[in-house]
Image: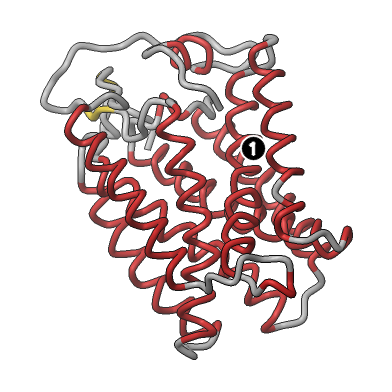
Amino acid sequence: MAPVRSGEWHNRAVTLPGMTTQTTPPITRGTMLNKVPEITVYFWVIKILCTSVGESFADYINETLGFGLLNTAVLFGVALVAALVVQFRTRRYTPWIYWLTVVLVSVEGTLLTDNLTDGHNVPLWISSTVFSVLLATVFAAWWVRERTLSIHTVNTRSREGWYWLTVLVTFALGTALGDWTVELTGWTPGVSILLPLGLIALTFIAWRSGANAVAAFWVAFVLTRPLGANIGDYLSLDKPEGGLGLGTLWPSLGFLAAILAVVVYLSATSVDRTEAPMPSDTDAVA
Protein backbone atom coordinates (compact mmCIF):
# COMPACT_ATOMS: atom_id res chain seq x y z
CA MET A 1 0.00 0.00 0.00
CA ALA A 2 1.17 3.56 -0.62
CA PRO A 3 2.35 5.93 2.12
CA VAL A 4 -0.28 8.19 3.57
CA ARG A 5 -0.20 11.39 5.50
CA SER A 6 -0.09 11.10 9.25
CA GLY A 7 -3.63 10.77 10.53
CA GLU A 8 -5.19 9.95 7.13
CA TRP A 9 -5.70 6.30 7.93
CA HIS A 10 -6.82 7.31 11.40
CA ASN A 11 -9.52 9.56 10.02
CA ARG A 12 -10.66 7.05 7.41
CA ALA A 13 -10.13 3.79 9.26
CA VAL A 14 -11.31 4.34 12.83
CA THR A 15 -14.84 3.16 12.14
CA LEU A 16 -16.78 0.72 10.08
CA PRO A 17 -20.16 1.73 8.63
CA GLY A 18 -22.57 2.56 11.42
CA MET A 19 -19.84 3.21 13.98
CA THR A 20 -19.24 6.45 15.79
CA THR A 21 -15.80 8.03 15.86
CA GLN A 22 -14.09 7.84 19.23
CA THR A 23 -12.82 10.98 20.87
CA THR A 24 -9.29 11.24 22.19
CA PRO A 25 -9.07 11.77 25.96
CA PRO A 26 -6.39 13.85 27.68
CA ILE A 27 -3.12 12.19 28.71
CA THR A 28 -3.24 10.76 32.23
CA ARG A 29 -1.28 8.22 34.23
CA GLY A 30 -3.71 5.57 33.03
CA THR A 31 -3.28 6.44 29.37
CA MET A 32 -1.91 3.83 26.96
CA LEU A 33 -0.77 4.99 23.52
CA ASN A 34 -1.71 3.15 20.35
CA LYS A 35 0.54 0.09 20.06
CA VAL A 36 0.55 -0.22 16.24
CA PRO A 37 2.61 1.99 13.87
CA GLU A 38 1.18 4.44 11.35
CA ILE A 39 0.47 2.80 7.99
CA THR A 40 3.21 4.21 5.79
CA VAL A 41 5.27 2.68 3.02
CA TYR A 42 7.75 1.56 5.70
CA PHE A 43 5.04 -0.56 7.31
CA TRP A 44 4.41 -2.50 4.10
CA VAL A 45 8.10 -2.84 3.25
CA ILE A 46 8.89 -4.40 6.63
CA LYS A 47 5.73 -6.51 6.56
CA ILE A 48 6.74 -8.09 3.23
CA LEU A 49 10.29 -8.60 4.47
CA CYS A 50 8.94 -10.27 7.61
CA THR A 51 6.83 -12.66 5.55
CA SER A 52 9.86 -13.55 3.45
CA VAL A 53 11.83 -14.24 6.62
CA GLY A 54 8.95 -16.36 7.91
CA GLU A 55 9.23 -18.59 4.86
CA SER A 56 12.99 -18.82 4.38
CA PHE A 57 14.12 -18.84 8.03
CA ALA A 58 11.56 -21.48 9.02
CA ASP A 59 12.79 -23.65 6.15
CA TYR A 60 16.42 -23.10 7.17
CA ILE A 61 15.87 -24.14 10.79
CA ASN A 62 13.56 -27.01 9.87
CA GLU A 63 15.32 -28.50 6.86
CA THR A 64 18.93 -27.29 6.70
CA LEU A 65 19.63 -27.60 10.42
CA GLY A 66 17.38 -30.64 10.71
CA PHE A 67 15.29 -29.48 13.69
CA GLY A 68 12.10 -30.89 12.22
CA LEU A 69 8.75 -29.13 11.94
CA LEU A 70 7.50 -29.81 15.46
CA ASN A 71 10.74 -28.87 17.23
CA THR A 72 11.06 -25.73 15.12
CA ALA A 73 7.47 -24.75 15.93
CA VAL A 74 8.10 -25.24 19.65
CA LEU A 75 11.36 -23.25 19.49
CA PHE A 76 9.77 -20.27 17.78
CA GLY A 77 6.62 -20.62 19.86
CA VAL A 78 8.64 -20.08 23.04
CA ALA A 79 10.45 -17.10 21.46
CA LEU A 80 7.10 -15.64 20.34
CA VAL A 81 5.60 -15.90 23.82
CA ALA A 82 8.65 -14.11 25.27
CA ALA A 83 8.39 -11.35 22.66
CA LEU A 84 4.65 -10.93 23.31
CA VAL A 85 5.29 -10.57 27.04
CA VAL A 86 7.69 -7.70 26.33
CA GLN A 87 5.31 -6.19 23.76
CA PHE A 88 2.36 -6.26 26.15
CA ARG A 89 4.40 -4.71 28.96
CA THR A 90 5.18 -1.61 26.91
CA ARG A 91 2.70 1.28 26.92
CA ARG A 92 3.51 2.69 23.50
CA TYR A 93 4.65 1.54 20.08
CA THR A 94 8.34 0.63 20.16
CA PRO A 95 9.66 -0.29 16.69
CA TRP A 96 12.17 -3.00 17.60
CA ILE A 97 9.79 -4.80 19.98
CA TYR A 98 6.82 -4.59 17.62
CA TRP A 99 8.67 -5.78 14.51
CA LEU A 100 10.56 -8.54 16.35
CA THR A 101 7.16 -9.85 17.40
CA VAL A 102 5.90 -9.66 13.81
CA VAL A 103 8.92 -11.62 12.56
CA LEU A 104 8.31 -14.35 15.14
CA VAL A 105 4.57 -14.43 14.42
CA SER A 106 5.43 -14.77 10.73
CA VAL A 107 7.66 -17.78 11.37
CA GLU A 108 5.17 -19.41 13.76
CA GLY A 109 2.23 -18.82 11.41
CA THR A 110 4.18 -20.42 8.58
CA LEU A 111 5.02 -23.41 10.76
CA LEU A 112 1.38 -23.89 11.79
CA THR A 113 0.38 -24.42 8.17
CA ASP A 114 3.49 -26.45 7.32
CA ASN A 115 2.86 -28.77 10.27
CA LEU A 116 -0.68 -29.42 9.07
CA THR A 117 0.41 -29.94 5.46
CA ASP A 118 3.69 -31.82 5.81
CA GLY A 119 3.35 -33.27 9.30
CA HIS A 120 -0.28 -34.40 9.21
CA ASN A 121 -1.01 -34.53 5.46
CA VAL A 122 -3.86 -32.03 5.69
CA PRO A 123 -4.74 -30.85 2.15
CA LEU A 124 -4.06 -27.18 1.52
CA TRP A 125 -7.65 -26.49 0.52
CA ILE A 126 -8.78 -27.71 3.94
CA SER A 127 -6.14 -25.59 5.72
CA SER A 128 -7.16 -22.56 3.66
CA THR A 129 -10.83 -23.12 4.46
CA VAL A 130 -10.25 -23.70 8.17
CA PHE A 131 -8.03 -20.64 8.58
CA SER A 132 -10.49 -18.51 6.56
CA VAL A 133 -13.33 -19.51 8.87
CA LEU A 134 -11.10 -19.00 11.91
CA LEU A 135 -10.12 -15.51 10.73
CA ALA A 136 -13.76 -14.59 10.13
CA THR A 137 -14.60 -15.89 13.62
CA VAL A 138 -11.80 -13.87 15.22
CA PHE A 139 -12.90 -10.72 13.39
CA ALA A 140 -16.51 -11.27 14.46
CA ALA A 141 -15.55 -11.84 18.10
CA TRP A 142 -13.22 -8.82 18.06
CA TRP A 143 -16.01 -6.66 16.60
CA VAL A 144 -18.63 -7.87 19.08
CA ARG A 145 -16.23 -7.28 21.96
CA GLU A 146 -14.67 -3.97 20.95
CA ARG A 147 -16.92 -2.48 18.22
CA THR A 148 -13.86 -1.69 16.11
CA LEU A 149 -11.38 -3.55 13.94
CA SER A 150 -9.17 -0.53 13.29
CA ILE A 151 -5.50 -0.81 14.11
CA HIS A 152 -5.65 2.83 15.21
CA THR A 153 -7.59 1.77 18.28
CA VAL A 154 -5.18 -0.88 19.59
CA ASN A 155 -4.98 0.96 22.89
CA THR A 156 -6.14 -1.55 25.51
CA ARG A 157 -4.79 -4.94 26.54
CA SER A 158 -7.93 -6.59 25.23
CA ARG A 159 -7.64 -4.99 21.77
CA GLU A 160 -3.94 -5.76 21.64
CA GLY A 161 -4.71 -9.40 22.33
CA TRP A 162 -7.27 -9.49 19.52
CA TYR A 163 -4.82 -7.76 17.20
CA TRP A 164 -1.99 -10.26 17.70
CA LEU A 165 -4.34 -13.24 17.46
CA THR A 166 -5.59 -11.84 14.15
CA VAL A 167 -2.05 -11.32 12.89
CA LEU A 168 -1.13 -14.93 13.71
CA VAL A 169 -4.16 -16.30 11.86
CA THR A 170 -3.50 -14.06 8.82
CA PHE A 171 0.03 -15.45 8.53
CA ALA A 172 -1.22 -19.05 8.74
CA LEU A 173 -3.99 -18.30 6.23
CA GLY A 174 -1.65 -16.47 3.86
CA THR A 175 0.75 -19.42 3.92
CA ALA A 176 -2.02 -21.89 3.13
CA LEU A 177 -3.54 -19.76 0.36
CA GLY A 178 -0.16 -19.08 -1.22
CA ASP A 179 0.90 -22.73 -1.22
CA TRP A 180 -2.52 -23.84 -2.46
CA THR A 181 -2.37 -21.38 -5.35
CA VAL A 182 1.03 -22.66 -6.41
CA GLU A 183 -0.22 -26.24 -6.10
CA LEU A 184 -3.26 -25.52 -8.30
CA THR A 185 -1.49 -23.50 -10.96
CA GLY A 186 1.91 -25.17 -11.07
CA TRP A 187 3.48 -21.74 -11.51
CA THR A 188 7.17 -21.19 -10.89
CA PRO A 189 8.08 -19.07 -7.83
CA GLY A 190 8.88 -16.06 -9.99
CA VAL A 191 5.55 -16.11 -11.82
CA SER A 192 3.64 -16.82 -8.59
CA ILE A 193 4.78 -13.45 -7.21
CA LEU A 194 2.57 -11.68 -9.75
CA LEU A 195 -0.80 -12.90 -8.41
CA PRO A 196 -0.63 -11.52 -4.84
CA LEU A 197 1.15 -8.44 -6.17
CA GLY A 198 -1.70 -7.81 -8.60
CA LEU A 199 -4.35 -8.41 -5.94
CA ILE A 200 -2.61 -5.96 -3.60
CA ALA A 201 -2.60 -3.39 -6.40
CA LEU A 202 -6.35 -3.92 -6.91
CA THR A 203 -6.91 -3.55 -3.16
CA PHE A 204 -5.00 -0.27 -3.21
CA ILE A 205 -7.09 0.99 -6.13
CA ALA A 206 -10.28 -0.02 -4.33
CA TRP A 207 -9.16 1.83 -1.19
CA ARG A 208 -8.29 4.97 -3.16
CA SER A 209 -11.69 4.70 -4.84
CA GLY A 210 -13.50 4.83 -1.50
CA ALA A 211 -13.59 1.25 -0.25
CA ASN A 212 -13.62 0.79 3.52
CA ALA A 213 -10.10 1.42 4.77
CA VAL A 214 -10.23 -1.14 7.58
CA ALA A 215 -11.32 -3.91 5.20
CA ALA A 216 -8.73 -2.86 2.60
CA PHE A 217 -5.98 -2.91 5.22
CA TRP A 218 -6.73 -6.44 6.39
CA VAL A 219 -7.10 -7.78 2.84
CA ALA A 220 -3.69 -6.34 1.97
CA PHE A 221 -2.29 -7.67 5.25
CA VAL A 222 -3.30 -11.23 4.30
CA LEU A 223 -2.07 -10.88 0.71
CA THR A 224 1.42 -9.70 1.71
CA ARG A 225 1.99 -13.12 3.28
CA PRO A 226 1.92 -15.14 0.02
CA LEU A 227 3.75 -12.28 -1.73
CA GLY A 228 6.64 -12.35 0.72
CA ALA A 229 6.68 -16.17 0.80
CA ASN A 230 6.85 -16.38 -2.98
CA ILE A 231 9.70 -13.87 -3.03
CA GLY A 232 11.53 -15.99 -0.44
CA ASP A 233 10.95 -19.16 -2.45
CA TYR A 234 12.10 -17.48 -5.67
CA LEU A 235 15.39 -16.50 -4.06
CA SER A 236 16.03 -19.75 -2.20
CA LEU A 237 14.84 -22.59 -4.47
CA ASP A 238 17.25 -24.25 -6.88
CA LYS A 239 17.29 -23.09 -10.49
CA PRO A 240 15.72 -26.30 -11.85
CA GLU A 241 12.75 -25.51 -9.56
CA GLY A 242 12.44 -21.99 -10.96
CA GLY A 243 14.35 -20.17 -8.23
CA LEU A 244 17.67 -18.34 -8.06
CA GLY A 245 19.39 -21.05 -6.01
CA LEU A 246 20.53 -18.79 -3.14
CA GLY A 247 19.44 -21.22 -0.45
CA THR A 248 17.52 -20.27 2.70
CA LEU A 249 20.31 -18.87 4.90
CA TRP A 250 21.52 -15.90 2.85
CA PRO A 251 18.07 -14.60 1.89
CA SER A 252 17.08 -14.89 5.58
CA LEU A 253 20.11 -12.91 6.71
CA GLY A 254 19.54 -10.34 3.97
CA PHE A 255 15.89 -9.87 4.92
CA LEU A 256 16.76 -9.59 8.61
CA ALA A 257 19.47 -7.02 7.85
CA ALA A 258 17.00 -4.97 5.77
CA ILE A 259 14.39 -5.15 8.54
CA LEU A 260 16.99 -4.04 11.09
CA ALA A 261 18.04 -1.10 8.92
CA VAL A 262 14.47 0.16 8.49
CA VAL A 263 13.65 -0.36 12.18
CA VAL A 264 16.74 1.63 13.19
CA TYR A 265 15.60 4.41 10.86
CA LEU A 266 12.08 4.38 12.28
CA SER A 267 13.40 4.41 15.85
CA ALA A 268 15.56 7.42 15.06
CA THR A 269 12.95 9.42 13.16
CA SER A 270 9.63 8.29 14.71
CA VAL A 271 7.98 8.88 11.34
CA ASP A 272 5.59 5.97 11.89
CA ARG A 273 4.65 6.74 15.50
CA THR A 274 1.03 7.51 16.35
CA GLU A 275 0.95 9.45 19.58
CA ALA A 276 -2.80 9.89 20.04
CA PRO A 277 -3.47 8.87 23.67
CA MET A 278 -6.29 6.43 24.31
CA PRO A 279 -8.00 5.03 27.43
CA SER A 280 -6.07 2.34 29.28
CA ASP A 281 -7.49 -1.11 29.73
CA THR A 282 -8.66 -0.11 33.21
CA ASP A 283 -10.99 2.39 31.53
CA ALA A 284 -12.28 -0.13 28.99
CA VAL A 285 -14.69 -3.02 29.32
CA ALA A 286 -12.73 -5.91 30.82
In this orientation, which residue lies closer to the viewer: 5 or 70? Answer: 5
Type of colouring: secondary structure
Position of residue 34 measured from the top left corner of the image (x, y, whole percent): 31, 28
Placement of the N terminus among the 4 image quadrants: top right
Q: Residues within 10 Å of mark 1 (few under 14, many from 20)?
A: some
Position of residue 231 measured from the top left corner of the image (x, y, whole percent): 60, 54
Q: Is residue 138 left or right of residue 86?
A: right
The image quadrant that residue 212 belongs to is: top right
Q: Residue at x 17, y 28 (%)?
A: 30
- Secondary element at tag 1: helix
Q: Is residue 153 left or right of residue 269?
A: right
Q: Is residue 187 left or right of residue 267?
A: right
Q: Residue at x 58, y 51 (%)?
A: 228
Establish if 163 lies above or below 248: above
Position of residue 224 measured from the top left corner of the image (x, y, whole percent): 60, 44
The image quadrant that residue 125 belongs to is: bottom right
**What residue is disc 1 on?**
140
The image quadrant that residue 63 belongs to is: bottom right
Amino acid at circle 1: Ala
In this orientation, which residue lies closer to the viewer: 148 or 230? Answer: 230
Establish if 18 lies above or below 282: above
Q: Residue at x 62, y 35 (%)?
A: 220
Placement of the C terminus among the 4 image quadrants: top left
Total count of labels? 1
